[in-house]
Amino acid sequence: MIKVLAFICINLLSVLLVSGQDKVLEKDIGQTKKEREKIKDISAKEATYPLPKNFKKEFKAIVDFKRQFLPIPIIYTDPNIGFTYGGGFGSLLFSDSGELRHILAPYVQYNDESKFGGTIRYMFLPTLKERYYFKIYKSEEINEEFLMEYINKKFYFDRLSFSVLGDIWDEGSARFFGIGKDTIHEDKMNYTHREQNYEMKLGAFISEYSTVNFGLKYRNVKVLQGLFDDEDQVIDKLSNNSLVRKEEIYEGKIRIKVNIFPEYDVDDAMMNIDFWGAYGEAFRNDNEEYLSWGLSSTWSWKALEKITIAGSINYQEVHGGNLPFYVLSELGGSRSMRGLELGRFFDKFSVSGMNEIRWMTFKLNTIGFTSDWEFALFYDYGMVANEHNEFSLGDFEHAIGIGIRTHFTKNVMTRVDIAYHDEGVKIFVDFGYPF
């Protein structure tokens, strides 16, 4: 039994390396009670910045790091594209103190739709609050991605956070079901989502209760012919519809986050209230302005030593005329509502909730690798609407499921969520908590 668990543990690390959910820039920066107490005593040397001397020092010492090589057999499924098979290896480098610092993962994979492809991922974790991430992926058919991300959560003596993301990608298995809560699954259409996305965020810790984040984003989006020849194509059925077109979008965003219980450590009890607003212009033949805003609350409570109850509720609305569907509020996916494909519902307004009971079960030590295993039961709900008065409890979508989470280090956690909805069973492979 232990050998079986060890094999699963090793291969669940590949979840981090093959997961399609790479972009975590939207995750807000927070501080624990202990971290806040250290702020007044922190020195300049303890703050980390992407300076040449820091890289030189790091890579000079890398020859002495402890190395570990892991085989990565890839067998996973995605609700949109189905099963993918392949293999490669993961190279993990640990510092003298045992911290995971570098991950390099080259591998090849095969999917019936996108055919053969190759991927190289590299992650550098100089501290628990700083991350560099690079990805190069290319398949025979359409799908590709070139991504670079930098996150620094202790910028300027732990008082600021900074992050930047550049992502160019084609996703040929994207689905569009139409606009509104009454769309049916049988009407799904396939398309390729081609996008260039550049984001920059700066956050500040206002007090022990609150943080504020400012963001700038540029998106260039185009809808093209998709991978699936046996399905209706968006580009054919809606080619003359204003919902489907090439678009350049410039967006400014502000986000305010309030911690209701700053006196508690986040592992014991936490409740955050998050408000954000965004103004954007979608440039086509003429300028199209839109305004979107949202309100959410995320909470957790450690009810017993190994059991935590957690949940979130989210509300969002978008205002503007003649906007493409990918600007509207969205419901479905690994971080929205499990049980539904990504992009299952679009409309101007959306509300959703996710609830989990998390049970930290055991610690596994094998081949010099330590992991903590957690199981979860979850219930998700939500709906979209064109107007406020269309919301009705009887129209909400519901999903239930189980999750398996593996904590490899303090800053690397993978998860597999299996969800049931009236439209079938969905399996999501991702890293980090869904909320």
Image (cartoon, helix red, strand yellow):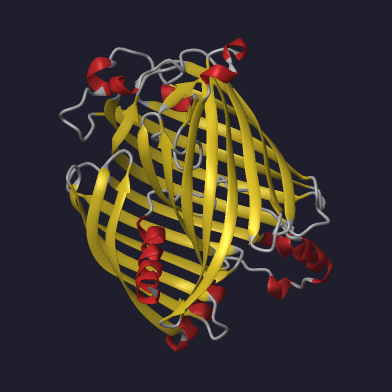
On screen, residue 59 versus residue 111, left or right, reads right
| Quadrant where the N terminus is found in the figure | bottom left
On screen, residue 347 versus residue 130, left or right, reads left
Residue 319 shows up from this direction: no
* x and y percentages locating residue 122 in the rendered image: 39, 65
Residue at figure coordinates x 51%, y 13% from the top left: 321
From what the image shows, is residue 365 above or below residue 407?
Answer: below
Residue at figure coordinates x 56%, y 45% from the top left: 26
Residue at figure coordinates x 15%, y 30% from the top left: 229
Extreme residue in the bottom direction:
64
From what the image shows, is residue 88 above or below residue 67?
Answer: above
* x and y percentages locating residue 177 in the rendered image: 35, 22
Residue 296 shows up from this direction: yes
From what the image shows, is residue 126 above or below residue 30?
Answer: below
Residue closer to the observer: 144 or 34: 34
Which of the 4 quarters of the picture holds residue 277?
Answer: top right
Which of the 4 quarters of the picture holds residue 159?
Answer: bottom right
The mark tally for this picture is: 0
* x and y percentages locating residue 427 in the rendered image: 37, 45
On screen, residue 155 versus residue 284, left or right, reads right
* x and y percentages locating residue 295 in the rendered image: 67, 32
Residue at figure coordinates x 29%, y 21% from the top left: 186
Residue closer to the observer: 420 or 190: 420
